[in-house]
Amino acid sequence: MRNLIAALIIVLALPETALALDTSTGPVRIEKVADGLRGPWAIGFLPDGGVLVTEKRGRLWHIQDGRARRVAGLPEVAVQGQGGLLDILVPRDFAESRQIYLTHAKPQAGGSGTALSVGRLSADGTRLTGTQVIVEMTPGSTGGKHFGSRLVEGRDGKIYMSVGERGDRPAAQDLSRHNGSILRLNRDGTAPGDNPFVDHPGAQPEIWSYGHRNPQGLAMDAQGRIWANEHGARGGDEVNLIAKGANYGWPIIAYGRHYSGSQIGEGTAKPGLEQPVMYWDPSIAPSGMAFHSGKTRQAWRDNAFVGSLKFDYIARLAGSPLAEVERIESPETRRVRDIREGPDGAIWFLSEDRGALYRMVPE
């Protein structure tokens, strides 16, 4: 363990490790923050300048002041296929609450499912205490596909959580199951009384929207709107503006095809089902999503940044409706798993293949 900790060294802004790169809005430099990570999945920022990074294999790291320390006290994690320790949320009131939220695959009867846990980070940043599961998808499923899952703290103080359909396509249209949905939750994991299906007999009350396939990006824009990106099958990766009670159509409509080449569902549109704001064909395998404030580059204001796992780039989306306007590519953008705007206004991202955390800073 000592060797792994030593491998994770903060190297902020050292010229020999910074890559200069031209983009359509001006030059940037890409700086390595930490490496030696194995299967990094998500980034969380602490108000004192520390950074938390999850690894899918079930480890959480606290990186600060040139050191990386492993955080103990995590929930039980099922590491299987695409499942493991996934997203992290540091809520706005962290300085008072010390709460950290984590999504993960949880062992369940009949398999495993996406769950949300919360614990309190110790003052020295090395342990979660009182960690407990507050929500888990029902029922459990076999296989290791399509867990989701991302977290956003809404402007309303509620937690929005994306859940994949676990490879069970019809379940995304079944309101009695959490599969293929965006959940809206109180901080204790309960369902808010104004959720759309609270009074719907047999429905899971936590569901906010449904008909999703595998949403691995979730973000809030400057207007407080919630957006998601999700994996299609062969083509048809989507960006969706999330609305209360809306059905996003999977697997009834889609812009891709099954991996066999056969048509999905009934085509690309049907009354009562939402259309994506944009889609990619061929698929880019999107993961992670962040809207930029314009703090460090005005041309980025209200732009969305999305990582591509398949084609190794960062997509910049702009306009109304959003559309991909640029692909930012470098040796560092290999399998971008997560992407965030940091407190410093830089774009921070995780490269799964490089096992590293980077920040992209406008010159």
Image (cartoon, rainbow, N blue to C red):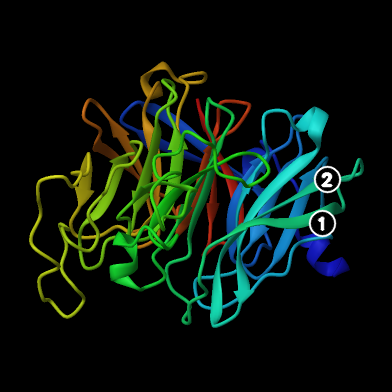
Amino acid type at image mark 2: Leu
The quadrant where residue 18 appears? top right
Image quarter of the N terminus: bottom right
- The residue wearing badge 1 is 71
State the mark number for residue 358.
Answer: none
- Mark 1 secondary-structure assignment: strand
From what the image shows, is residue 191 above or below residue 293? below
Question: Is there a contact, CB below 8 Å, between mark 2 and mark 1?
Answer: yes
Comparing 234 with 246, the one in front is 246
* Whole-percent x, y for residue 141 in the image: 48, 77
- Mark 2 secondary-structure assignment: strand
Q: Residues within 10 Å of mark 2 (few under 14, many from 20)?
A: many
Which residue is at 22% across, 39% downward? 277
Which residue is at 65% across, 53% downward? 102
Q: Is residue 290 visible?
A: no
Amino acid type at image mark 1: Val
* Whole-percent x, y for residue 227 in the image: 38, 38
From what the image shows, is residue 343 above or below residue 232? above
Horizontally, residue 175 falls left or right of residue 99, namely: left
* Whole-percent x, y for residue 229 in the image: 35, 48
- The residue wearing badge 2 is 121
Q: Earlier in the sequence, mark 2 or mark 1?
A: 1
